[in-house]
């Protein structure tokens, strides 16, 4: 019985396939309201994807439950992008595209925390509270462990789900329960539009300016410009730019920041597969001060554009460990239905003409954090006096 069923199914699929081919090969061209006229090239392209349509028909006919066709198409699109074999090229569903846009613009509706899925205790950990956010207003602090959202328990493995619940319409409320010093604290928070602080800065002892750049997104250029103005007014003796664990972001942001601190010239050039080259140049108006740049193995992409330009212009000293080595750029596109994609479109080159992809940038001064310090830094919990890389940067600026 089983062999007969398999034979019948195979015959049915073969007939379907032959019918589909016959239909395609005899597809009439004309102006009937049920037909369209296409070029031979378009027709041949349609034939390439005939298998996908056949798969869809088979699933629709034989799968034992109803399927969501939109999810099938999203899956097919995601599979096509995955077929490139490039981890940086991908397809976005409508929801994923919305999230991507929020991150890029640095603005979203929620409570205003940066979170980490802590692998040690498997808890959702607050590592940063954005300035002026609802979370800051109610008293949530870095180091708090989020255990309940609206009385629903969440672990680190469920952080994405917890984030979705905490985000929502501005003016609506959400209850967040945190664990702090073995005590649970409930916070009733009103969601608001949150501006992500991608930059934090301060003036350290010995009158040294310190600016941490978390990502090259949102209004990061304006944030660094504000830091530069503050340092200039204070007459700092030097500036530390911290790019550690900065995974990159927008090329324009890296160029905009370079424009604040570097002399006239090319910051980065990009070359596509057709050999077309584009350059990003800056003018000669800039803030001239001794600079040290902190980098590590998670400084990537736009971070390496800025670090590479500072190195090539001999405008500062790089301290830390070798950078990640992502010397390629992506172009993002959004479609009319709200879905979108990101595709690697070019290699980039530092001002000296070097492509650092899969190579990275070696620091001028090698300095590595130990394992415990690395973990604390990832949680934004490493005291400055115990940060050996930062202390090395301070020593360099002090001429020690």
Image (spheres, rainbow, N blue to C red):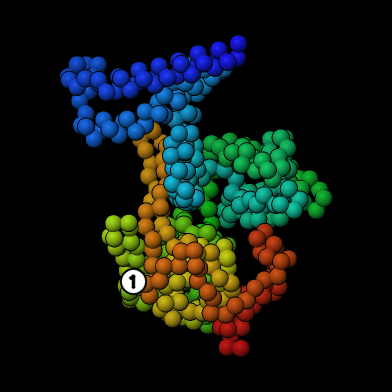
Residue 152 on image: x %, y %: 71, 35
- Residue 149 to residue 384: above or below: above
**Residue at horizontal 40%, vertical 26%?**
53
Which of the pair 389/188 is nearer the observer? Answer: 389
Which of the pair 292/113 is nearer the observer? Answer: 292
Which of the pair 210/245 is nearer the observer? Answer: 245
Q: Quadrant of the N terminus?
A: top right
Residue 392 on image: x %, y %: 62, 79
Q: Quick one: SS at disc 1?
A: strand
Q: Is residue 177 visible?
A: no
Residue 291 on image: x %, y %: 50, 78
- Residue 93 to residue 326: above or below: above
Residue 94 on image: x %, y %: 46, 36
Q: Quadrant of the C terminus?
A: bottom right
**Residue at horizontal 37%, vertical 70%?**
267
Q: Is residue 74 left or right of residue 391?
A: left
Q: Is residue 292 left or right of residue 343?
A: right
Task: Give the farthest residue toward the right.
Answer: 182
Quarter where residue 141 is shown = bottom right
**Residue at horizontal 37%, vertical 38%?**
335
**Residue at horizontal 54%, vertical 17%?**
6
Which residue in the protein does label 1 denote?
266
- Residue 377 to residue 193: above or below: below
């Amino acid at each position: 019985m089983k062999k007969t069923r398999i034979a019948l199914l195979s015959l049915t699929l073969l007939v379907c396939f032959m019918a589909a081919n016959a239909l395609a090969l005899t597809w009439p061209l004309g102006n009937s309201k049920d037909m369209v006229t296409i070029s031979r090239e378009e027709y041949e392209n349609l034939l390439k994807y005939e298998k996908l349509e056949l798969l869809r028909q088979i699933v629709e006919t034989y799968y034992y439950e109803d399927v969501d066709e939109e999810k099938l198409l999203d899956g097919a699109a995601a599979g096509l992008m995955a077929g490139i074999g490039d981890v940086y090229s991908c397809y976005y569903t409508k929801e994923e595209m919305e999230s991507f846009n929020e991150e890029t613009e640095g603005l979203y509706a929620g409570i205003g925390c940066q979170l980490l899925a802590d692998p040690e205790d498997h808890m959702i950990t607050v590592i940063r509270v954005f300035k002026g956010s609802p979370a800051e207003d109610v008293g949530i602090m870095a180091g708090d462990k989020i255990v309940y959202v609206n009385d629903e328990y969440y672990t680190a493995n469920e952080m994405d789900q917890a984030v979705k619940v905490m985000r929502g319409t501005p003016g609506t409320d959400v209850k967040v329960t945190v664990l702090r010093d073995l005590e649970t604290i409930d916070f009733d928070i009103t969601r608001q539009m949150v501006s992500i602080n991608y930059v934090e800065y301060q003036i350290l002892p010995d009158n040294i300016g310190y600016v941490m750049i978390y990502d090259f997104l949102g209004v990061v250029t304006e944030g660094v410009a504000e830091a530069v103005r503050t340092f200039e007014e204070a007459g700092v003796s030097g500036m530390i730019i911290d790019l550690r664990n900065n995974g990159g972001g927008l090329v324009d942001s890296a160029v905009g920041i370079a424009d604040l601190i570097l002399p006239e010239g090319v910051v980065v050039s990009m070359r596509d597969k057709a050999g077309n080259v584009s350059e990003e140049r800056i003018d000669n108006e800039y803030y001239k001060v001794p600079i040290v740049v902190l980098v590590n193995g998670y400084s990537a992409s736009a971070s390496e554009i800025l670090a590479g330009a500072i190195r090539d212009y001999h405008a500062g000293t790089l301290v830390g460990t070798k950078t990640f080595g992502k010397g390629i750029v992506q172009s993002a596109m959004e479609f009319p239905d709200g879905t979108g994609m990101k595709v690697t479109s070019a290699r980039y080159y530092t001002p000296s003409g070097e492509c650092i992809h899969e190579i990275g940038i070696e620091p001028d001064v090698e300095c590595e954090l130990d394992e415990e310090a690395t973990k604390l830094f990832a949680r934004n919990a490493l005291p400055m006096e115990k940060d050996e890389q930062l202390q090395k940067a301070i020593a360099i600026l002090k001429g020690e």
